[in-house]
Amino acid sequence: MANSTLRTVVFDPANGDRFSYSNTAVVITDGQSNVQPDQTLAEARRLHGFADVFAVGVTNDIDYDELSVGRRPVTFFRKLAYL
């Protein structure tokens, strides 16, 4: 759902998006889709079509394939303990 909202609302010229500037999104997630999970990867791929996307997983249970959206190379940093 967040990917779709970014694509259709945030990066919309009616809401201030400018074609002369590149789009960048930082998505902070637990890496587990729970709203329309069957659409998550397709929506993420659509978003990657016109924005640079950085996904940040914040739990130990993230789905690495989902975070990477099938794109390579992907860099993961893993923190083993949280304060």
Image (cartoon, rainbow, N blue to C red):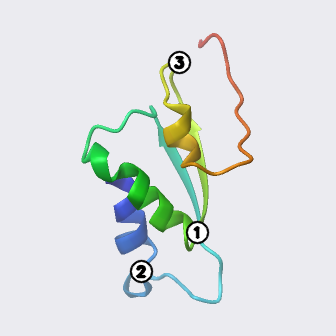
Q: How crowded is mark 1: few (under 14 residues within 10 Å), some or many (20 or more)?
A: some
Position of residue 28 measured from the top left corner of the image (x, y, whole percent): 50, 42
Quarter of the view holding residue 2: bottom left
Q: Distance between the residues labelled 2 and 1?
A: 12 Å
Image quadrant where one finds the N terminus? bottom left
Marks 2 and 3, the one that precedes in the sequence: 2
Marks 2 and 1, the one that precedes in the sequence: 2
Query: What kind of element bears circle 2?
Result: loop
Give the labeled residue for mark 1: 51
Q: Do the residues labelled 1 and 3 touch (CB within 8 Å)?
A: no
Give the labeled residue for mark 2: 12
Task: Give the residue drawn at x 68%, y 23%.
Answer: 78
Q: Please tell me whether residue 66 is drawn above or below residue 30 in the rendered image.
A: below
Q: What residue type is labelled 1?
A: Ala
The label on residue 60 is: 3
Query: What kind of element bears circle 1?
Result: loop
Task: Give the residue drawn at x 54%, y 49%.
Answer: 69
Q: Which amino acid does label 2 sit on?
A: Asp
Task: Give the residue drawn at x 44%, y 31%.
Answer: 30
Q: What residue type is labelled 3?
A: Asn
Position of residue 31 measured from the top left corner of the image (x, y, whole percent): 46, 34
Q: Which of 34 and 82 is in front in this view?
A: 34
* Nearer mark to the viewer, of 2 and 1: 1
Q: Residues within 10 Å of mark 2 (few under 14, many from 20)?
A: some
Position of residue 53 measured from the top left corner of the image (x, y, whole percent): 59, 57
Q: Distance between the residues labelled 2 and 3?
A: 34 Å
